[in-house]
Amino acid sequence: MRKGALFSLILLALPAGAGAKPPVVVELYTAQGCGSCGDANVYAAKLADRKGVLLLTFPVDYWDYLGWADTFAKPEYAERQKAYVTRLSLREPYTPQVIVDGRAQAPGLKTQQVDKLVRDALRAPTDPPEVRFIGPRRVDVGSGRVPRGGADVWLVRYDPRAQEVMVKSGDNRGRSVVQKNVVREMTRLGAWRGRPTAYRLPKVGEEGLETVVLVQGQRGGRLLVAVSPD
């Protein structure tokens, strides 16, 4: 390991000073073919503008059988949602669904319930590991307490624009669906075991995307921290 990289990891092993609290991560599971998702998309777009909140929209593909193939959905997003179903002891995945910091969930149309979950998360104490981007191709995660079962480091790239799609078949035929902060790329960088660790970042794929690194308990566990490059 080069001296610079080693020095960086040594710094990350030291106790972190009091810095800005990481954002509350709100995940919206939605689909263009979901007849009840439109209002949830509108509400989520407002959440995206709230201070201290990071909205990530995950379009799922299990409504495609109704006649419209979601233009943004990926099977791995539905698998991610299924992990929450197991972790949170739910009966089955559904849309629109909101997951807050990997800890709690609510129907996306129950906005007062979602608002309360977000407020509670904003007030909750945190003790996250420090995360630093080292140039365009590396991210370092410092020391910290690991959730039971271990943790993973994820690279997420999402489109910050509000994107409008005209649905031509299925339950939303003839309707315009608007989605914001749609996740376009999600890559597992590796496991995190509580020790300072460096992870290699893949080359940028689609242009114009925002980047965030998540440290999260495995298989739908709680989110420890979300950090974007400066």
Image: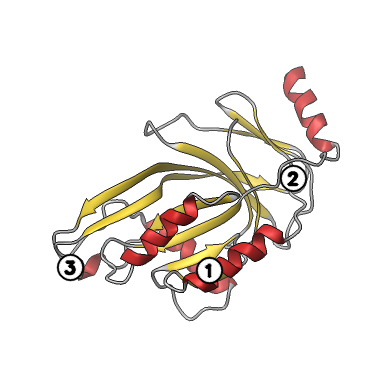
Q: Which amino acid, by three-letter code, is at mark 3?
A: Gly
Q: Nearer the viewer, mark 3 or mark 1?
A: 1
Q: What is the distance, in whole Å, between disc 3 and disc 2 at their CAs?
A: 45 Å
x and y percentages locating residue 173 in the rendered image: 15, 65
Which residue is more in the foreground, 26 or 6?
26
Quadrant position of residue 146: bottom right
User: What residue sits right under mark 3 in the picture?
Assistant: 170
Looking at the image, residue 89 sits to the left or right of residue 143; the answer is left
Q: Residue furthest right?
A: 15
What crowding class fits label 2: few (fewer than 14 Cα within 10 Å), some (14-19), or many (20 or more)?
many
Q: Which amino acid, by three-letter code, is at mark 2?
A: Pro
Q: Nearer the viewer, mark 2 or mark 1?
A: 1
User: Which mark, residue 114?
Assistant: 1
Please determine whether, in this image, residue 9 is positioned above or below residue 30. above
Please determine whether, in this image, residue 114 is positioned above or below residue 187. below
What crowding class fits label 1: few (fewer than 14 Cα within 10 Å), some (14-19), or many (20 or more)?
many
What crowding class fits label 3: few (fewer than 14 Cα within 10 Å), some (14-19), or many (20 or more)?
some
| Residue 76 appears in the picture as rendered | no
Q: Earlier in the sequence, mark 3 or mark 2?
A: 2
Q: Earlier in the sequence, mark 2 or mark 1?
A: 1
x and y percentages locating residue 188 in the rendered image: 54, 46
Tag 2 and tag 1, C-beta contact below 8 Å: no
Q: Residue furthest top?
A: 3
Residue beneath the point at 71% across and 37% down: 197
User: What residue sits right under mark 2 in the picture?
Assistant: 129
Mark 1 element type = helix
